[in-house]
Amino acid sequence: MIYSRDLADLLPVVQTMAHRLVDACEAAGIDLLITSTYRDEDAQAVLYAKGRTTPGPSVTNARPGESFHNWRVALDFCPLECGKCAWNDTNTFERVGVIAEALGFEWAGRWTGGMKEMAHVQYTGRLTLAQLRAGSVPVIT
Ligand SMILES: [Zn+2]
């Protein structure tokens, strides 16, 4: 089971974008901790089971293969303040989201219908899950 926090486990194009995001945040005075990059389908199955067939709150609606993390194009982050995760700092999450969008990421802080996730960005180059599954690779536009 793989739950990676390593940018090197993202697709090369997405690594480039992720470095741009970290650098742009640093320039804006925001220290980002990357909490999740790639996770494999077994790891996704464990997450999907939470709140369904195993205890705890539900944490994802994505089944194995349905998360963009499974396709190495998504990352989760938390802003750090004095070295500590500032999970409740909505303002800084929004600043990061706006910076990410300006670079070309999709930011899940805009998502609706119960999918909203302040800590998640992805760079798909407008590819769908089906296209990623079929082997298409995003490009930077
Ligand atoms: Zn995520």
Image (cartoon, grey):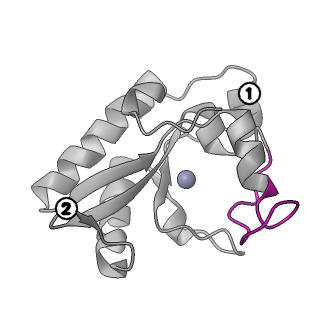
Residue 59: image x %, image y %?
68, 64
55 drawn magenta: yes
What amino acid type is highlighted by mark number 2? Answer: Gly
Instruction: Give the farthest residue toward the front.
Output: 55
Q: Is residue 139 above or below residue 46?
A: above
Residue named by callout 2: 83
Which one is in front, 34 or 74?
34
Left or right: residue 90 versus residue 118 is left
Residue 133's tag is 1
* Residue lying at 36% horizontally and 70% vertically, measured from the top left: 93
Where are the magenta residues, as a range? 49-63
Q: Position of residue 32 (x, y in %)?
A: 27, 55
Q: Quadrant of residue 141?
A: top left
Disc 1 residue type? Arg
Residue nearest the viewer, comparing 126 with 3: 3
Helix, strand or loop under label 2: loop
Residue 76: x percent and y percent?
A: 46, 52
Q: Residue furthest right?
A: 53
Q: Residue at x 29, y 73 (%)?
A: 92
- On the rendered structure, is 16 left or right of 137? left
The single residue placed furthest to the top in the displayed view is 135
Q: Which quarter shows the N terminus?
A: top right
Is residue 140 in view?
no
Q: Is the residue marked 2 within 8 Å of ligand 1, measured from its CB?
A: no
How many marks overall? 2
